[in-house]
Structure formats: structure tokens, C-alpha cells
Amino acid sequence: MTVDDFWPILRDGVRARRPSAAFGLRLDGRLDSAALQLFELFKPLLDLGRTSDGWVIAQLGQSLDGCVATRSGDSSFINGSESLLHLHRLRAVCDAVIVGAGTVAIDNPQLTTRRVAGPNPIRVLLDPNLGLSEHVMTARPFNDGQAPTLWLCDARWRDRAVARVGADRVLAVNDLVRDDTTLHLANAVTALRSRGLTRLFVEGGGVTVSRFLAQGCLDRLHLAVAPVIIGDGRRGLQFTGPARLADCPRPPCSVYPMGPDHLWDLDLRAST
Ligand SMILES: NC(=O)c1ccc[n+]([C@@H]2O[C@H](COP(=O)([O-])OP(=O)(O)OC[C@H]3O[C@@H](n4cnc5c(N)ncnc54)[C@H](OP(=O)(O)O)[C@@H]3O)[C@@H](O)[C@H]2O)c1
């Protein structure tokens, strides 16, 4: 079986929370090598669906020197077409794709599954203090009609957000921002889950993925590393880490070749 034949089966398996063991015997010897790699890559998500109420995965496409964009914000495209296909596959198995305000302001992304067969996720624009007020009315996700979009902010800004985009497009979360600065992303995850959005994909940018990572809100992280050097670009992972190298996390990981890139799949649940 080729990737094209296998992808819809795998996608529906993740969405239906079918454990990887349920595929085992049926697939034995039937997958070609590319389809087998696809199965291995998505296997953790199949198994997370069985053991938890929901999961959160993040992905960053980055340079060898850890940048997700140049200093001007240009990130199209760091990765090759195989990695972009993978990105769209992740969208297709998730209920919601989350991006930070900086990404909306700079990229104005569509966040659809146009490169693969599969449903578009709900688009979630994470904007705790409504930094996007200037951009939100023209942001593609609020105008292209391709999938529902939520503007996710702290509850104190609910009325202002509703006045801009309407109540059905606002998710105002209690206690998302504390002491005016500290974000509590677990509250955002809980609010999304309470709407039935249990498979969550944090797609960037670097600040947003780093905040989810530092707050222990990620189950897995995919880093698609491309053979390019950017220099003084926008950082991918960035947070205050331990002072001692011995205290830095070394999560279990697997590496998959993806065209010219290499995809690192990090198991963050095992390291917490
Ligand atoms: N290669 C990839 O995988 C990938 C994926 C997505 C995006 N990107 C690139 O990443 C860059 C954006 O990522 P990022 O880490 O800077 O941000 P981000 O994670 O998308 O968003 C969070 C940051 O945006 C700031 N922000 C809030 N409102 C804003 C506004 N109106 N305009 C600009 N910024 C605003 C926030 O400030 P506060 O801290 O004050 O809230 C926060 O620092 C873009 O260049 C995009 O092209 C790359």
C-alpha cells in the first residue's frame, strides 16, 4: 500500500482514537517503505488518543541555526515540500490549529489542509491582550470562509473582541493572563477542550510554541530542520532554561528523513 492509499486510513484512525495496535496485523507486510514511515511517525498520536482526554502537538520548521524566519519575518518557505505536506497532515488530524498573534500579523496564514486530503481544522488565533485589533478584520481566517475561526483572548477583553468579530468567533478565557503579563496556557487548553476541541496543534511562531513548551502544555514537538542557515533571524525555541547542562531536558526522540529536511519527533510527555 502506498502513502496515498494509506493516508486516509491513518488520518481517520487518529481522528477516531484508534490505537496503533489495531492497525498492526492488518498492515503486516502491506505497506511500502514510505507508508511504513508515515505509520511510525503518527503512531504516537494514535496511542495518545487512547490514553488521554486529548493531546497537544506543536511543530516548527526551522533552520540549522534554530530560526523560524529571517529578521524581517520571512518564513516562506524554510522547509521543502515533503515537510509542508507533513504540516498539512498534522492539521488534518487535529480539531484545532493554534497560531500566535505575531504569525497572524506577519504571515496572514490560511491554516488549511489544501496540500492533503482531510478536513480543515478550526483556526485559533491566540491573542491574549488583543494585540491583533488592527489586523483581525482583514485576517484571512476571518474572511476566507474555509473553516471556523476563533479569536482567543483573556476574558477581560471579551466585550471588545465580541464587538469586533461577533460572539460566535470569540473564545474569552478566564485567567488566561495573570498579573497583566503571565500567560496560563493550560487554561486555554482546558477552554478549547470544553468546546470538544481535544486534538490541538500549535503551529507557531517561535514565541508561542516556546510558551506552550515551557509551561508543560505539549505532549509532542515536531521540529522540521532544513539545511539552511539564517543568522540573525527570529528564534524558534526561546525560553529561560536551566543554568546547568545536566538539568536540561533530553526528551526521547526519533528522526525521520523528509526530502532535504529531517523531522525530529520529541516525546515531551516522557520527559516530564
Ligand atoms: N517556520 C515556522 O514553523 C513558522 C511557523 C509560524 C510562524 N513563523 C514565523 O514566525 C514569526 C512570528 O513568530 P513569533 O515567535 O514572532 O510570534 P508568535 O508566536 O506568532 O506570536 C506571539 C508574539 O506576537 C506578539 N504580537 C502580539 N500582537 C502582535 C501584533 N499585532 N503584531 C506583531 N506581533 C504581535 C506577541 O507579543 P506579546 O508577547 O506582547 O503578546 C508575542 O510576542 C513570523 O515571522 C512567522 O513567519 C514560522
Image (tube, helix red, strand yellow):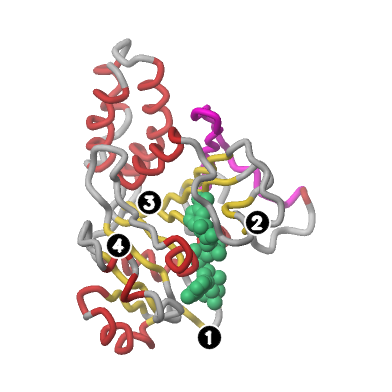
Instruction: Say above or below: 117 vs 173.
Output: above
Viewer-nearest of labels 4 and 1? 1
Amino acid on which the number 1 mark rests in the picture: Asp
N-terminal of the two: label 3 or label 2?
A: 3
Q: Which residue is mark 1?
A: 180
CA gap between label 4 and label 1 equals: 24 Å
Callout 3: few (<14), some (14-19), or many (20+) C-alpha neighbours within 10 Å? many
Q: Which residue is mark 2?
A: 233
Task: Measuring from the top left, give residue 22's x and y in whole percent.
Answer: 26, 27
Amino acid on which the number 2 mark rests in the picture: Gly
Instruction: Say above or below: 170 vs 247.
Output: below
Callout 1: few (<14), some (14-19), or many (20+) C-alpha neighbours within 10 Å? few
Some atom of ligand 1 lies within 8 Å of the CB belonging to the residue at label 3: no
Q: Tell which residue pokes out farthest to the top in this image.
A: 29
Amino acid on which the number 3 mark rests in the picture: Trp
Which mark is drawn over residue 55? Answer: 3
The residue shown at (34%, 54%) is 111
N-terminal of the two: label 4 or label 1?
A: 1
CA gap between label 3 and label 4 equals: 10 Å
N-terminal of the two: label 2 or label 4?
A: 4
CB atoms at circles 4 and 1 under 8 Å apart? no
Callout 2: few (<14), some (14-19), or many (20+) C-alpha neighbours within 10 Å? some
Callout 4: few (<14), some (14-19), or many (20+) C-alpha neighbours within 10 Å? some
Viewer-nearest of labels 3 and 1? 1
The residue shown at (78%, 59%) is 243
Can you see residue 216? no
